[in-house]
Image (cartoon, rainbow, N blue to C red):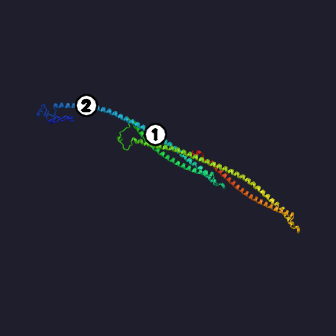
Amino acid sequence: MSSEVFVSRPHYDSRAVAQGVQERDLSVKPDVPQPSSGSATAGYRSAKYGPAEWFSNYHSILQQAGTESHAARSLQRESKALHQDTEAGTFKTQGEGTRLLGERLHEIHSWKSELQRHIEQLQADTESLLALKTRLENALDASETPYAISTDNLSCRARRLGPDLVRDSVEEELVKEVDLIRSVQALLKRTTAQVVRQIKMNREAKQTLEMDWSDKYQAYNFDDHSGRHSNMSTDTRHHPSSATFQDQVCNCTSWTKFTQDNLNKAQQEEQTTHSLRLLVEQVLQDTTEDLEFQCSSVDRAFSRRVQELIEAKTQMETKLAQVLEQIGAQERNIVLLQQAIHNKEAPLRVAQSRLYLRSLRPNMELCRDQPQFSLEGEVRQIDATVAALQQQLSEARRSLSHLEESRITLEKDINCKTHSLFIERDKCMIHRKRYPAASKLLGY
């Protein structure tokens, strides 16, 4: 033991202070006798507690221990209750989150399926429009053949000769056919441009749906992966910042409206495509029917014209045969008239010779007797007959000239009709047999 003198120290109970128990006043002297402060007991006088302090101290310790035990039991009960409540709440919240994720997955899958259906529909509509575009282009190409045929027919018929170069019903129908083909070509070009615009609109709508579908596909995978997380998962980590609210994200209403607007736009394009397809089919059908009807009208006009030409040529050939027969007869008549005039030369010479000889009679013998009258009458008769024959011969020759002119005219007209028949029947009508079939005009 040290030889130092222990001095008394004040007693300070921290627990008592914590519990609000007033600290004992050390200045109050206890009732117990104080030890002697003599030098003989200096080594045994140390700062020791008194019995009361000892009792008070361990009673305070017991009381504090009991209080702490009671508080600990209360805290344990509260902790157990809180643990049970929080455990149930956590499981309930987690289950609710899993359920909501499942519902969200179902909703995303439903929208994704609807988007996929319209994407496939737009793809099918676009392919059908591409097929119609090809048909329109084929029909436009096919219309070049009727146009070439009609213009060639007009060019060929412009080479008709003489009076056959007439603006008849065939030419009028051909001009109508050319105008119709031009209008059909213009209509097909406008319709093709409209189809091209609709194909572009369909592709834009399809691209929008595909982007929305792709976003929903990724969101579905993320939510599906999230829904598969459990408390036993090893790939979960703390992400404190993920729980903060983000101002730039959309809400459910705007999310649904965005997809619904895309679908409405796609449905509008689908309806427009359906109407356009019906329009294109009707345009192709109407143009084909119009072209075929006009082609039939031109063919009928050609047939009538060819029949008229054949009949006119036949009549002129018959008339030419008659004229040729009349020319032969007239030529023979002229020969007969010339022979008749020639035959009158001898009788005239005889009668004139007789009159001349009788005019040489002398003196009173030169009288106008009956022979003289007879011979004078004979000469006058022969002169009259020759004059009549000369007149008849002149008329016969004039008639022959007219017949020759008629023959030349008929032959020229027959040649003209033959040339026209060649153009109409052997050129134009043969060329029109190359008119495209209805399937080509429909674009197939």
Above or below, 69 against 307 in this view is above
- Closer to the N terminus: mark 2 or mark 1? 2
Image point (25%, 31%), residue name: 70
CB under 8 Å between discs 2 and 1: no
Are there few (<14), some (14-19), or many (20+) residues within 10 Å of tag 2?
A: few
Height in image: 66 above or below 338?
Answer: above
Locate the C terminus and report the quarter of the image it occupies: top right
Q: Nearer the viewer, mark 2 or mark 1?
A: 1
Residue 92 is left or right of residue 293, and the answer is: left
Question: Residue 55, percent across and down?
Answer: 18, 30
Position of residue 191 measured from the top left corner of the image (x, y, whole percent): 53, 48
The reply, left or right, for residue 165 in relation to residue 273 is: right
Direction from residue 106 to residue 131 in the image, left or right: right
Residue 2 location in percent, x, y?
A: 16, 35
Please tell me the numbered disc located at residue 76. none
Q: Tell me if I can see residue 118 in this picture.
A: yes
Q: Measuring from the top left, give residue 335's x and y in whole percent.
A: 79, 58
**Structural distance between the alpha carbons of marks 2 and 1:** 64 Å
Q: Which label belongs to residue 114?
A: 1
Q: Mark 2 belongs to which amino acid?
A: His
Q: Nearer the viewer, residue 117 or 65?
A: 117
Which amino acid type is marked by label 1?
A: Glu
Q: Which residue is mark 2?
A: 70
- Say if residue 357 shows up in the picture: no
Q: Crowding near pointer 1: few (<14 within 10 Å), some, many (20+)?
A: some
- Give the structural element (helix, strand or loop) at label 2: helix
Point out the image quarter for the N terminus: top left
The residue that appears at 65% across and 49% down in the rendered structure is 304
Q: Quadrant of residue 77?
A: top left
Q: Secondary structure at mark 1?
A: helix
